[in-house]
Image (spheres, rainbow, N blue to C red):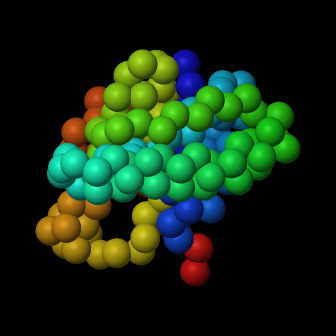
Amino acid sequence: MSVVLGYDESPGAARALRTAIEVAAAYGEPLVLVYGAAPPGPTGEEYRAHHDAIRQAGRAGLEHAVAAAEAADVPTTVEVIDMSPAQALIEAASRHGARVIVVGTWGESPIRGALLGSTPHKLLHLSTVPVLCVPTEV
């Protein structure tokens, strides 16, 4: 089993990272750090440039998370997946036999999340794995 974390350096990501590390350490399981890197519609050279930039930003952002997990002696796997964040997390959770998916929230209202389709909201409705939504720090 594993703990899967959606990490993107958003306002809720830092606290979600700490929580995911705590859960992984408590269960003695590896932490799978996932970044969904789906660029907008596939069209020519712009698509490739945008795609490469998104993947590079994801990998750079995940370096901080890897360092934090390693400091807590939690083994990590990093995945940059060419899907929307929610789909990337669901796919990674399935492949890694996840115990839980951990995501941060931005402190938006439930109605805003439902209307705009936030990643936590999508996961709560689509995932067959338990989802832990960690609120941002105030």
Q: Is residue 70 left or right of 81 when viewed as pictured?
A: right
Figure quadrant of the C terminus: bottom right
Identify the residue at horizontal 84%, vertical 44% (top origin): 71
Residue 19 can be seen in this image: no
Q: Height in image: 138 above or below 42?
A: below
- Which image quarter: residue 81? top left
Identify the residue at horizontal 76%, vertical 49% (top origin): 68
Identify the residue at horizontal 49%, vertical 27% (top origin): 99
Q: Position of residue 49 (x, y in %)?
A: 38, 53
Identify the residue at horizontal 29%, vertical 75% (top origin): 109
Q: Position of residue 88 (x, y in %)?
A: 36, 37
Q: Position of residue 42 (x, y in %)?
A: 20, 46
- Which image quarter: residue 2? top right
Task: Pick the residue in front: 116 or 138.
Answer: 116
Q: Height in image: 5 above or below 12?
A: above
Task: Pick the residue in front: 61 or 41.
Answer: 41
Q: Height in image: 5 above or below 90?
A: below
- How many marks can you see? 0
Residue 75 can be seen in this image: yes
Q: Position of residue 52 (x, y in %)?
A: 44, 48
Q: Residue furthest left?
A: 115
Q: Is residue 41 left or right of 135 when viewed as pictured?
A: left
